[in-house]
Image (cartoon, helix red, strand yellow):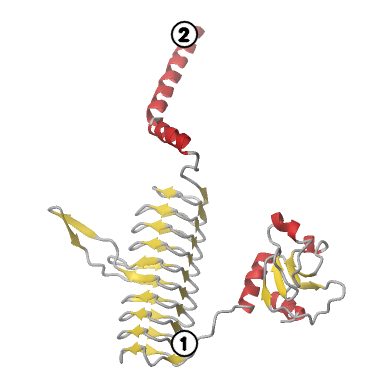
Amino acid sequence: MSLAQLALELGAELRLAPGVDAAHEISGLCTLQDGKPDQLTFLANPNYRRFLKTTSAGAVLVTAEFADGCPVSALCVDNPYLAFAKASALFNTAPLVEVGVHPSAVIHPDAEVDPSASIAAGAVVEAFAKIGPRASVGANCFVGEGSTLGEGSCLYAGAILHHGCQVGRDAIIHSHAVIGADGFGFALHQREWIKIYQLGGVQVGDEVEVGANTCVDRGALGDTVIGRGVKIDNLVQIAHNVQIGDYSAIAACTGIAGSAIVGKHCALGGSSRIAGHVTIADGCQVTANTFVTKSIDSPGVYSGGLPFADSQSWRRNAVRFGQLDKMARRLKDLEKQLAMLSCTKDE
């Protein structure tokens, strides 16, 4: 695309470098450090400003504040990172899918597949499943009985959508994600585990993205619910009957236990752990490696866990954590004794 076209698409003010005209073509994206004359980059974090002076990119997305220090053409925007996200869609390199059903796909006669949908090689679509307009079912995917893949949604190769699960519009389910496997439900009887069959489903909202190898379990009775616009990273475990509010984001390796409720516009850092049956209020941020064991009632940033240290120091601190209760009791006794001494002196 030309710089003029990019400026129009991104709503940017174009400031051309000397000797460059608006027809200069951009064919891809890059970092500030590794840019080429036919590539576009961005400056969002001031910590990277030092790379701006030496960039060889064809143009940079910047705020007006940094445009004067840009040695190449500048596309001035209020939010360079947001503009870069929009630009990434313009230069997306993912191959286009072919409309239609591959001869090796297995489609049940009672399934509904829109003529504009794509069903790739080796995919299986079971009875009463519905594949919406422009939806894409990748190679070796499975869509279970009675499930729905909404308009414009995509199952990448190897993704599984079990029976009775609903995926909304423009959702992305990455490879080997599993939506609707049984939740972890068992009753202990005479030292044996008796399976509790999971009778609910999963509801995945519009514009949701689910990362590779992530598992969203079906509900035991009601449904597990993933709200609109939720973004879930790779290797996340979401247990049965969990509810995730609209536009929340969950980073990799997080585990959310059964019946937990995460509010709207929340962010869970990598390797977070959310105990079962707790509720997290709207607008909460849980930092990486935090274990939430009780409900959070108000928005804010919450952290837990120990930072790393050399092993010897870490072991000493771990022992002291086990002594905290005794230390707190001793401190309380000392405070009482000091208060009594103070009263005696006053008398």
Q: From the viewer's perspective, tell me whether residue 94 is left or right of residue 106.
A: right
- Estimate the x, y position of residue 322 in percent, counting from the top left: 38, 33
- Along the line of sight, which residue is nearer the eye, 183 or 226? 183
Q: Which residue type does callout 1 highlight?
A: Pro
Picture mark count:
2
- Per the rendering, the mark at residue 344 is 2
Q: Quadrant of the N terminus?
A: bottom right
- Estimate the x, y position of residue 74 in percent, counting from the top left: 78, 69
Q: Secondary structure at mark 1?
A: loop
Image: 72 above or below 133: above
Residue at the image point whose x is 65% and y is 74% from the top: 87
Image: 210 above or below 328: below
Give the number of the mark in front: 2 or 1.
1
Q: Which residue type does callout 2 highlight?
A: Thr
Q: Residues within 10 Å of mark 2 (few under 14, many from 20)?
A: few
- Along the line of sight, which residue is nearer the eye, 16 or 295? 16
Q: Which residue is mark 1?
A: 133
